[in-house]
Image (cartoon, rainbow, N blue to C red):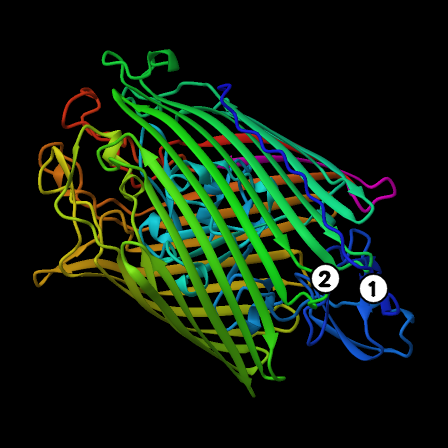
Amino acid sequence: MTNRFLSLVMMLALSAPVAHGQAVVQGRVLSDGGPVPGAHIQVEGTPLGVAADASGHYRLAGLAPGRHVLVVSAVGFATQRQPVHLRAADATETVDVVLRRAVLAGEEVVVTGTMRERYVKESPVKVSVVRAERLQRGRARANLMDLIGSVGGLTTQLNCGVCGTNAIRINGVEGPNTAVLIDGMPIMGALASVYGLNGISPSIIDQVEVIKGPQSTLYGTQALGGVVNIITKDPAHTPTFSVDTYGRSTHEGSVNLAASPQVGRFKGFVSASGLRMEHYFDDNGDGFADVPKRSRIGLFGKGTLASSDGIPMLNVAAKLYGEDRTGGTVDFTDALRGSGAVYGESIYTHRAELLTEIRPPGFDQRLRIRSALTVHDQDSYYGMEHYDAQQRIVFGQATWDQPLTGALRLLTGTTLRYEMYDDNTPATPTADRRFIPGIFAQSELMVGDVTLLGGLRLDHHTAHGVVTAPRLSATYSPSDRTTVRASSGTGFRVVNVFTEDHAALTGSRQVVFAEDLRPEQSRSVTVGAEHILPFGANPLTVSIDGFYTRFSNKIIPDYDRDPNLIVYENLDGFSVTRGLSIDVDQNFTAWPIRYDASFTLMNVFTAEGGARRAVAYAPDYTGTAGLTYQWRAVGLDVAYGARLVGPKRMPDGYVEEFGRARRSPTYTAHDLKLTKEFSSVNGPRGVGVEAYLSVENLFNYTQGSPLVDAANPFSDRFDTIYTWGPIVGRTIALGARLNLR
């Protein structure tokens, strides 16, 4: 690992007046005689809420005398409303709450759709929630991109068969149109979207929230196709100490260490992860490594400071990440970077992030001030092509959440975003600096069984003036079992060509700009319905969603005009992504079995000059399936996951000259994971020990070589992007984890 590693030093101080004479409610959240760690306790009608600790205990302070209602929820349990009466200003009431196992779905708490905590079934915007345990189903965890394919409607597109860069596609829409957030903060800039996603360790993820369709009203540019919000772990719900390590049959090894220190009113979570894979293998016989060698280190820390009344006042998170990645022929090493004799690609990446959230006392948590800082440097060689890039992002946001009446609520906010991007390519002759101020407002009205949500955002871009992003959503819930949603909105995005298509550097083609590129814009409509069939105590949830997004000024690289060129220009016509998805999820309470499945049918095309054409690399359909079974008698969990990817149109330039297929075949990939529990953290010593065995790509299906003209890597015809399926065959991983409470 290179010595050029960034460091951050934080000195934080915050003092607040201590409230006196206010009542306290405390107690435990239980189910089946045991605690419910992480249960959420909210005072109805207020933003005041806390989470139960590992033993189910909670404490709510700062309440006025009188009658209150506690709303208690947890994943896998039905929400419980518990009234409590506080008779005096200094009263302390003990209220234990017993939760029952959920018969209905949608009990998860999400924040992405409306920028405030809501239950999934109550959110006017459709939000898909994927918990950490489901992300890891069937696979040994390595990074977010290894696991994201288990989410319905999401696929990962490998953009380089030598260096292994990839992107997230939502319903077939290109990766740069997906806004990736960390704890709701849009700090994954253009440069980070290429390699930074591989550096997000699942060990720091609590859940992933996904919204399909434009979300620029709340999250600004880069949210044309949708939002993936990575919610990191709450320090209050993490083990005191944990170790997780695994080794793969590809000679890849990983270790993650985590601890949760607590000092007074401060609760923290720190994690250190490392990965190393320096083994060369070429099973497809094209003369290049099937996966790049890589070494990476990630450090993550998160802390929460509460007031003397237990109310969170300050959240701080920091992340440091460094990676060296090397791909190419067997003789290539980093010492040959830029060599004209031996082809290889070498990428050095360094990244630092700092996120803060302040909830000033005295505002009933209605005011939230958030900030983020990102520093990203990359020094790379793609063959003889040198790419040296830097990106800096400073982001600030303040929001005010104000209930106006019992049925009407208003959220207002302002943002300031500064971006600096610079590289040594012809695409960026001078540093690209953008200062983007914005304001937004969102109102929510509940009328009987109907909830209406309307919002508008105004951003000012120096080159494009004021950009508006409105949206309107409606939810109708005639019963606890049925929810119908409709939503419309717009999106806007200013592009960065390097991230639009990694082939601009990784092949030997010349990049040509046929015109000054205009920003992309989108308009979208989604309609969906969700219904829960009880089946006694074994609820089956069925969701059907239709989506339509129309892009104007679409920027799609043209690979077919000239085999030696990549031509960038705005589409004279328009581009459309439309389709239908269906999801099913069933949890058996009588048996320890749960399964889910999804299928998404898509039609992604461009229309120009009266002709329609499928967009390259967008699959016609995708699907996922998963099954988990707990063999309690022996302490064994069995998890199975499968992915289905339909045919894609491939670039035409490789069909005649190189005999490549114009369309890729349909394929499936299957994973199996066995986890054996030797002791539980709920035991008398609070020690949990597990061992797991996973078999990934169970049936050893691969696409073959993703390279074009691999025998002549320095020629004009060499390319690395004929990628549509798995490159690595069956892989076996063996790991273990230790948790101490």
CA gap, disc 1 and disc 2: 10 Å
Measured from the top left, where is residue 168 in percent x and y? 39, 47
Measured from the top left, where is residue 476 in percent x and y? 50, 81
Q: Could you tell me what secondary structure mostly forms the magenta stretch? A: strand
Residue 293 is a magenta residue:
no
Left or right of 366? Residue 71 is: right
Residue at x 69%, y 45% (from the top left corner): 303
Residue at x 18%, y 58% (from the top left corner): 606
Is residue 697 in view from this perspective?
Answer: no
Label 1: element kind = loop
* Of residues 238 and 254, the one drawn nearer to the viewer in this rendering: 238
Label 2: element kind = loop
Residue 682 is a magenta residue:
yes
Label 2: how many Cα within 10 Å (few below 14, some 14–19, many 20+): some
From this view, report whether residue 201 is shown above or below residue 364: above
Magenta-drawn segment: 679-696
Q: Which residue is mark 2?
A: 361
Q: Which residue is mark 1?
A: 19
Measured from the top left, where is residue 655 in percent x and y? 13, 38
